């Protein structure tokens, strides 16, 4: 194969959406080896410019695995929708035999012996693990940088932040270095990087995607793993692989995950949507963010939705204090043993130390009271859903910012009093355990992407994906505005 034909094959193969690529592999239009060669070539060419994929595995071993996938197809042993897909799980998810650093020097040499459940599932479905995607230290913060691998840069502007904590996943996906990507989301970590890289990022309902194996099964209810895609259909297909009950995770949901692989078409004429905006002025917004998202509301109206401004009956500042308590409690429980060891504490970033110390100061009654307040918040949203089918609000409060900035210190003249206050807009769906997807909302005058969140009723994951799909057909932002690096 000469260089000219190889280059064309690379663009053709990596340019397919994941649904199309899966069909091409199964129908033998392309081989798994051709797919692997094409994606590795793209990674070789673009990853040095953005630092999205880390711990990339040895090429010969990956090609051997791709050849085995071809042999499996030849003998009729098709493993599933992801057969032959190159995949790089987020560097928080354990991968057997492949480093899982959590973006921390403490775990720089950590090589797990067991896969995370979501990794098990994509491997059973035929995916080939090629490496990991970069994440901030311990997954803390919506800016992907760490002392192990460095900073991941935005797919659309390499001087800007990629978002986080699934920043590496989003950039790798936006630049066609992966066909689909996984991530995790506590404080918008699937939604913020999707918004910052003109993608779709879905935080599923609580328990939809089982998290584990883990030594604590009942309290870790704020974070969840989930899918990202360049199309809603791609994302939904990945969810169909990730979702489903696992008896190692007692709070995981039942139900047939295959439903997410079926048609997403639905008529939305007359669907009622509440626009939450900036929560009545409570949320500081960079100039242009709110206006861009409000402009995107027109696309929902073109598919028949009725949009009204409305707010839940709950103090947003009280919601923030609830968030600080529950997040501090969980982070202290998870990272507290690292903090307790002086040699490890010396390797932790200041924000991680602050989180642990915040949690260690909490009395038990404060945590229980926060759980009561979280319950009241869920009931307030549930009351709003008696009138509306969906809720909308921006995915972020600022456009992608300078990649050298650890986090925005102020927004529109308002000082941010914690390292994550600038992402307050995402905490509502997390605390309520509701399904929520970030969809592209367009671009600023400076060419920077932004997203808008679609929040659904409890466990209405499919319904949220159906509305996102209808919105996607009306806007086509991913197809209309591609990163300039793709043409290089």
Image (cartoon, rainbow, N blue to C red):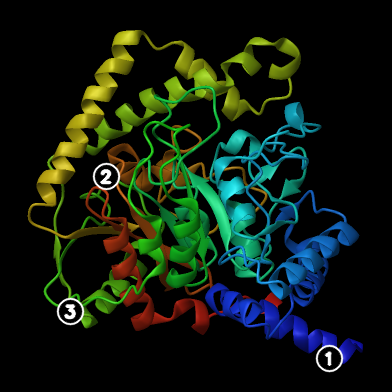
Snapshot quadrant of residue 294: bottom left
Snapshot quadrant of residue 303: bottom left
- Sequence-wise, the earlier of marks 1 and 3 is 1
**Looking at the image, which residue sits at the far left?**
387
From the viewer's perspective, is 287 left or right of 390?
A: right
From the viewer's perspective, is 333 left or right of 103?
A: left
Q: Secondary structure at mark 2?
A: loop
Q: Mark 1 against mark 2, which lies toward the viewer?
A: 1
Q: Are marks 1 and 2 in contact (CB under 8 Å)?
A: no
> Where residue 62 appears, x then y in whole percent?
82, 60
Q: Looking at this view, is 361 or 217 the one in front?
A: 217
Q: Identify the residue at image location x=56%, y=77%.
A: 17
Mark 2 surroundings: few (<14), some (14-19) or many (≥20) residues within 10 A: few
Snapshot quadrant of residue 353: top right
Q: Mark 3 against mark 2, which lies toward the viewer?
A: 3
Q: Looking at this view, is 174 or 26 the one in front?
A: 26
Tell me, for residue 5, which label it has, or none.
1
Instruction: Using the rendered image of the protein, determine whether residue 462 is visible from the camera's viewpoint.
Output: yes
Residue at label 3?
304
Q: Separation of disc 1 and disc 2 at Cα? A: 55 Å
Q: Separation of disc 1 and disc 3 at Cα? A: 46 Å
**Number of dots carrying numbers:** 3
Q: Identify the residue at image location x=45%, y=54%.
A: 191
From the viewer's perspective, is 193 left or right of 291?
A: right
> Where residue 484 appears, x then y in whole percent?
66, 78
Q: Identify the residue at image location x=40%, y=24%.
A: 219
- Sequence-wise, the earlier of marks 3 and 2 is 2
Mark 1 surroundings: few (<14), some (14-19) or many (≥20) residues within 10 A: few
Q: Separation of disc 3 and disc 2 at Cα? A: 30 Å
Mark 3 surroundings: few (<14), some (14-19) or many (≥20) residues within 10 A: some
Residue at label 2?
282
| Quadrant (top left/top right/bottom left/bottom right) for the N terminus | bottom right
């Amino acid at each position: 194969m000469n260089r000219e034909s190889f280059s064309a094959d690379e663009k053709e193969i990596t340019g397919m959406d994941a649904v199309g690529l899966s069909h091409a592999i199964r129908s033998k239009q392309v081989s798994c080896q051709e797919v692997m060669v094409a994606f590795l070539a793209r990674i070789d060419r673009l990853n040095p410019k953005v630092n999205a994929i880390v711990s990339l595995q040895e090429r010969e071993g990956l090609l051997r695995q791709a050849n085995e996938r071809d042999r499996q197809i030849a003998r009729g042993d098709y493993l599933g929708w992801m057969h032959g897909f190159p995949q790089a799980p987020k560097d928080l998810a354990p991968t057997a035999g492949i480093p899982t650093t959590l973006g921390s020097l403490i775990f720089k040499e950590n090589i797990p012996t067991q896969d995370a459940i979501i990794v098990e599932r994509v491997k059973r479905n035929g995916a080939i693990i090629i490496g990991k995607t970069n994440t901030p230290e311990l997954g803390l913060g919506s800016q992907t940088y760490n002392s192990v691998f460095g900073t991941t840069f935005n797919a659309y502007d390499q001087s800007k932040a990629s978002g986080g904590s699934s920043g590496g996943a989003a950039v790798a996906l936006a630049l066609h270095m992966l066909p689909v990507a996984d991530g995790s989301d506590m404080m918008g970590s699937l939604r913020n990087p999707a918004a910052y890289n003109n993608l779709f990022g879905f935080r599923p309902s609580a328990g939809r995607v089982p998290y584990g194996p883990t030594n604590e099964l009942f309290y870790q209810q704020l974070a969840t793993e989930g899918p990202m895609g360049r199309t809603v259909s791609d994302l939904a297909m990945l969810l169909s692989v990730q979702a489903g009950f696992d008896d190692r995770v007692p709070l995981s949901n039942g139900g047939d995950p295959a439903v997410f692989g079926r048609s997403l078409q639905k008529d939305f004429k007359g669907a009622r949507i509440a626009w939450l905006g900036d929560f009545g002025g409570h949320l500081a917004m960079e100039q242009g963010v709110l206006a861009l998202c409000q402009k995107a509301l027109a696309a929902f109206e073109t598919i028949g939705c009725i949009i009204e401004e409305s707010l839940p009956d709950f103090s947003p500042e009280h919601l923030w204090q609830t968030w600080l308590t529950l997040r501090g409690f969980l982070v202290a429980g998870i990272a507290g043993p690292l903090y307790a060891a002086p040699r490890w504490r010396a390797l932790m970033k200041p924000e991680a130390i602050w989180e642990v110390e915040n949690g260690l100061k909490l009395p038990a009654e404060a945590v229980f009271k926060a759980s009561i307040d979280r319950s009241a918040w869920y009931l307030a949203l549930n009351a709003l859903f008696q009138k509306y089918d969906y809720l909308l609000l921006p995915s972020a409060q600022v456009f992608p910012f300078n990649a050298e900035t650890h986090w925005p210190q102020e927004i529109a003249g308002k000082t941010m009093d914690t390292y994550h206050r600038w992402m307050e807009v995402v905490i509502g769906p997390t605390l309520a355990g509701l399904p929520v997807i970030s969809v592209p909302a367009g671009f600023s005058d400076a060419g920077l992407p932004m997203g808008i969140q679609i929040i659904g009723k409890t466990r209405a994951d499919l319904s949220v994906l159906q509305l996102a799909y209808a919105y996607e057909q009306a806007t086509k932002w991913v197809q209309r505005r591609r990163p300039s690096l793709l043409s290089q």
